[in-house]
Amino acid sequence: METKAKLQRLKKTVYTLLKIPLLFLVLYIFVCSLDILSSAFQLAGGKVAGEIFQENAILSNPVAGLVVGILVTLLVQSSSTSTSIIVSLVSSGLLDVQSAIPIIMGSNIGTSVTNTIVALMQAGDREDFERAFAGATVHDCFNWLSVLVLLPLEAVSGVLRHLSQTAINTLQLSGGEDAPELLKVLTEPLTKLVIQLDKSVLTAVATGDQIERNKSLVKHWCKLSTVKENETSWGAQNFSEQTYKCIHLFVDCSLSDLAIGLILLACSLLVLCSCLILLVKLLNSLLKGQVANAINKVINTDFPFPFTWVAGYLAVIVGAGMTFLVQSSSVFTSAITPLIGIGVISIERAYPLTLGSNLGTTTTALLAALASPGNKLAAATQVALCHFFFNLLGILLWYPIPATRLPIRMACALGKCTARYRWFAVLYLLLCFLLFPSVVFALSMAGWKEICKEEKSKGEPQGNHPAAMVQKLQGTAATSPQARPAAMYARADPAMDPETRDLGHITPQAKTQQSQGAQASASSDQE
């Protein structure tokens, strides 16, 4: 009996030990599927996103810019991609920083949809679903509340623009090294075998390059930098670039970008859902009983009074650091969503982790901006700093004082509603990220067009207004064959000098000169 009990304990220990590497393997495939999902969205709607950015007249409207940021980030499923397009537009002079700020706010909202979709995978158990959905939507609530306060404030005072400009003027900026890609080093060996994208095409479409517009986003030729063996007389080595055919599944595929994107979208969603189900089951089996209690105590316990507030700020730092390491807020928040669902992380602790994640993703963008060339450095850094200050001001608004932590209460209410009516989760996604932004965009554009018409009508005299009649006469005179330069009018007749003519009225000086000329001509006739 004792030997059987020992064997059972040994088997249980071996199974538990085997589950740990399996957990990491499933987590790795989960992260890779998120990367491929992003590529799929870019293939399916990337060029549409780039074309949206071309409408600079639309982007001058702050509300329209916000919605464009949401929709574009939904299409490409990556705030870093949409932010990089914004940076390239600003640095090329096609978009000013003032118009870019609302788009950055929109990209912050758009990136939070991924973990909300992840929460839907836990709809099987009501309690788990309530916790998971609340943990996911706390990110949405924070972003929406921050936008509702900071977007009007920015439109009125330009606080983010002035803060970022002051920071740039204070800092002695110089180009840095490339931003670290710690997660890419791990995921690229697998994702590169599936699909490789030429993201420069997206930027070219956004900047209006008609040649790049017809190119495919699928990368067919890869560049390899090599160092030539022969050295020059002054000791410098010559670099050369060699191209070779890329190695991935769709390199020789004749399908369109949309078709490839849809195929990858279906496959990546299938893999994503499977990995999530396995992750939840493995976590439930590993983190139960005494292990779950121990982790709960470590993660969710506060420091003793009067330092209870320190734990929350430590969670913000941990969230920022983890997001900096994985270089994606979507990956980090999606990874902690199942943990929130099974009750390992409480929503009160998940909230500061999410806020830290928001800060961490802006730090990565800031490092990427510092790696820009010298002529693009200031504009790229200012856009990245606007993103950073937006999240920092949002944290100052909705975290330090417990009474102002409205996102937690809002998310808990949404979690209870979705646990009772599961269809509400899908309705929430459609309303919050698609229908509501689209309606606001349409209404804001209608109002913006009317404002533009009013400004034009104020700026340009119309109808029988005297100024309009003079402008018509001036236009007729300029286009007639008898039109003369202004200098000739000045010499021949001062009354017709454009500088002395004022809406058809003759100045006193011109009248005097005109009368003197008339008297001289009359005396010559008499002679």
Image: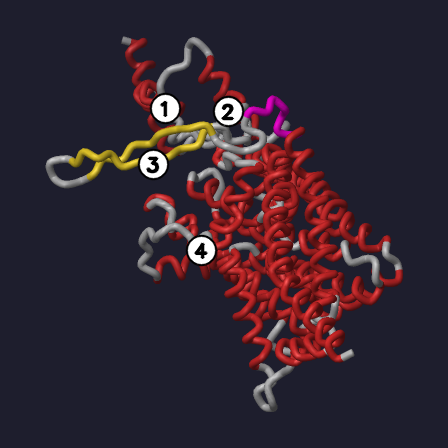
Q: What stretch is highlighted in magenta?
A: 252-258
The answer to whether 414 appears left or right of 467 in the picture is right
Q: Which label's residue is closer to the chain start, 4 or 2?
A: 2
Instruction: Quote the CA–CA distance across marks 4 and 1.
Output: 68 Å
Of the numbered discs 1 and 3, the one sitting upstream in the chain is 3
Distance of label 1 from label 3 (alpha carbons) = 78 Å
Q: Earlier in the sequence, mark 2 or mark 1?
A: 2
Which one is in front in this view, the residue at disc 4 or the one at disc 3?
3
Give whichever of 160, 487 is nearer the camera: 160
Q: Which residue is drawn at 44% across and 58% down?
A: 164
Give residue 225's mark: 3
Where residue 28 appears, as percent x and y from the top left, is 59, 53
* Tag nearer the camera, 3 or 2: 3
Q: Dot 2 surroundings within 10 Å: few (below 14), some, or many (20 or more)?
A: few
Mark 2 residue type: Gln
Badge 2 marks a residue whose secondary structure is helix
Q: Which mark is residue 210?
A: 2
Instruction: Please give the residue where the numbered disc 4 appears in the rendered image.
Output: 366
Residue type, numbered disc 4: Leu
Q: How far separated are the C-alphas under marks 2 and 1?
A: 58 Å
* Amino acid type, callout 3: Ser
Label 1 amino acid? Gln
Q: Name the residue under label 1.
A: 514
Crowd tier of the residue under label 4, counting other residues whose Cα lies within 10 Å: few below 14, some 14–19, many 20 or above: many
Say if the magenta span includes residue 32.
Answer: no
Give the foreground label among 4 and 2: 4
Say whether disc 4 or disc 1 marks the residue closer to the N-terminus: 4
